[in-house]
Image: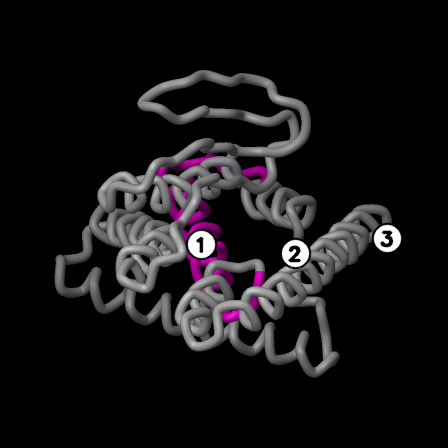
Amino acid sequence: ALIGLVVFIHELGHYIAARLTGTPVETFGVGFGPVLIERVKWGTKWRIGWIPFGGYVKMELPQDSSRLCKDSAIILAGPFANLLVTFVCLMSVCLINGLSLGESVGRVWEVLVLVTNATLNAFGNLLTFTSAEDFQGPVGILSSTREAIAGREFHFTHFLILVGVMSFGLGSINLFPIPPLDGGAFVFLWLRPLAPRFMKMVELVVRATGALALIAFMIFVTCKDVIKLFV
């Protein structure tokens, strides 16, 4: 449920930016596989799939150089929504625990710097084939969450921390300039006008390669997490 919520926040950012820029949205989907629920509202198909991981907002971005700023806003709105929710959740935790507004901002900043450094180090280890132990898939996240709250009373602040950390992870990773992530889409959006036909071909190849690599990585991480459950 938490993963679905974080994904919904991400896709909602894309959706809101699209509506604000006058871009029609054909489908808003959370989850994959067979459709569990589907409704049409505000000219958009709203879908929930049986597999509660991942999501998408289907729309056609016109190939128009005059829309570069609008399309950039749509692409970056997903990660921005996640980062905004992270800030709100962590600020709320600090304020609930009695910190002043100034102290809360400082504490949240410290946490975000630490998590950002950890994320960059993890990606550095992955790209240099040093280690993939720092990454967890859905199975690993659920397992770690259960271990963290086992035998303890679950408070609302725990929920806020989980949503904040998971939202930060999704938002920050999507900013990496690697297709099919949002960061990769942003880079190709600005490169495409330089040589439209050539860059379109390059983008298709890079997107397909990136998608396969991402799927392979998720399968690897999920298998690693499942094995840990029995070792």
Q: Vertically, is 126 above or below 77?
A: below
Q: Residue furthest left?
A: 101
Q: Is residue 19 left or right of residue 12?
A: left
Compared with 52, 10 (above or below) is: below
| Residue 123, above or below 24 | below
Circle 3 sits in a helix, a strand or a loop, which is it?
loop
Rounded to the nearest angstrom, the CA distance separating label 3 from label 1 is 27 Å
> How far is disc 2 from disc 3 in space, using C-alphas?
16 Å
Mark sitting on residue 165:
1
- What residue does disc 3 label? 231
Left or right of 203? Residue 166 is left
* Residue 207: % across, % down: 62, 61
Q: Residues within 10 Å of mark 2 (few under 14, many from 20)?
A: some
For the point 75% across and 50% down, the residue is 222
- Asked if the residues shown at circle 2 and circle 1 are in contact, with their CB atoms under 8 angstroms apart, the answer is no
For image coordinates 72% across by 54% down, the residue present is: 215
In the image, residue 174 lies in the stretch drawn in magenta: yes
Q: Earlier in the sequence, mark 2 or mark 3?
A: 2
Spatial separation of the CA atoms under disc 2 and disc 1: 13 Å
The residue indicated by pointer 2 is 136
Q: Amino acid at mark 2?
A: Gln
**Residue drawn 39% across the image and 26% down it:** 44
The three-letter code of the residue at mark 1 reads: Val
Write down the region rendered in magenta. Answer: 150-179
